[in-house]
Image (cartoon, grey):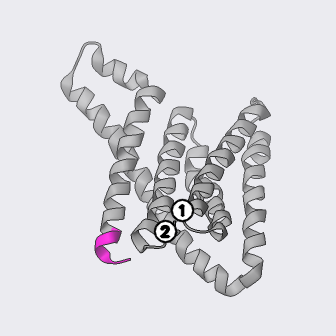
């Protein structure tokens, strides 16, 4: 992984995060665009576009910090915990999904547990698809670390968004983080040349 490849990864992830959140904002915050459209004010409309693009860029940078932090933690844990690291990863995946449901439900006096359950199941299923793809393109051993990254690290990155009162921004954040994390995970082996032989 040389500097040119790292810069390529950084820039493409940055652009992807910005565009994904900008696109998602049309569905999750249409009211922000309606204010600029009725009557149409070009400056305000452009400002709203820049605002959501900026949000996406921020989420992309958070995603990249989490990704490179995980790469370092993974190498450190492999050396320190050795054979215990894989079971620990599996435990942390289960605990994180449990936390997304149970503890958030306890903190919310008015909500239904079904909403929290749907979020955890959705995150797990999408993460499972990404991890299976990673294992298919590299090796079977990569499945659990990829699933750990997509579930646990994405949730840790998402923590500030989980405390927001506005659910639209919570959803914009997880969409941006998840897409950027999946992109980085599936791009890394292509950049380092560790693709599974056909």
Q: Can you give x and y, in whole percent of width and height, for residue 184 in the image?
A: 46, 60
In the rendered image of this protein, does residue 170 appear above or below residue 13?
above
Q: Is residue 185 magenta?
A: no
Q: Which residue is most to the front?
A: 198
Residue at 75% in and 39% down = 117
Write the residue at 72% across / 84% down.
82
Residue under circle 2? 195
Q: Which residues are magenta?
A: 1-6
User: How many numbered callouts?
Assistant: 2
Q: In the visual, does 143 lie left or right of 113?
A: left
Q: Quadrant of residue 135?
A: bottom right
| In this view, 11 is above or below 5 | above
Spatial distance from mark 2 to mark 1, Cα to Cα?
6 Å
Q: Which residue is mark 1?
A: 137
Q: Nearer the viewer, residue 194 or 78?
A: 194
Q: SS class of the residue under badge 2?
A: loop
Q: Residues within 10 Å of mark 2 (few under 14, many from 20)?
A: some
């Amino acid at each position: 992984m040389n500097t040119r490849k790292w810069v390529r990864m950084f820039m493409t992830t940055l652009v992807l995060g910005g565009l994904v959140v900008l696109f998602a904002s049309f569905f999750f915050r249409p009211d922000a665009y309606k204010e600029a459209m009725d009557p149409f004010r070009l400056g305000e409309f452009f400002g709203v576009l820049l605002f959501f693009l900026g949000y996406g860029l921020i989420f992309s940078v958070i995603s990249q910090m989490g990704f490179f932090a995980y790469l370092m933690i993974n190498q450190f844990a492999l050396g320190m915990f050795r054979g215990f690291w894989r079971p620990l990863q599996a435990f942390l995946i289960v605990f994180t999904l449990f936390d997304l449901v149970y503890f958030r439900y306890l903190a919310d006096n008015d909500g239904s547990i079904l909403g929290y359950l749907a979020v955890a199941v959705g995150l797990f299923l999408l993460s499972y698809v990404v991890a299976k793809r990673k294992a298919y393109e590299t090796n079977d051993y990569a499945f659990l670390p990829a699933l750990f990254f997509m579930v646990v690290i994405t949730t840790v990155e998402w923590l500030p968004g989980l405390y927001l009162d506005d659910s639209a921004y919570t959803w914009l954040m997880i969409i941006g983080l998840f897409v950027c994390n999946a992109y980085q995970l599936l791009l890394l082996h292509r950049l380092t040349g560790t693709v599974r032989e056909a």
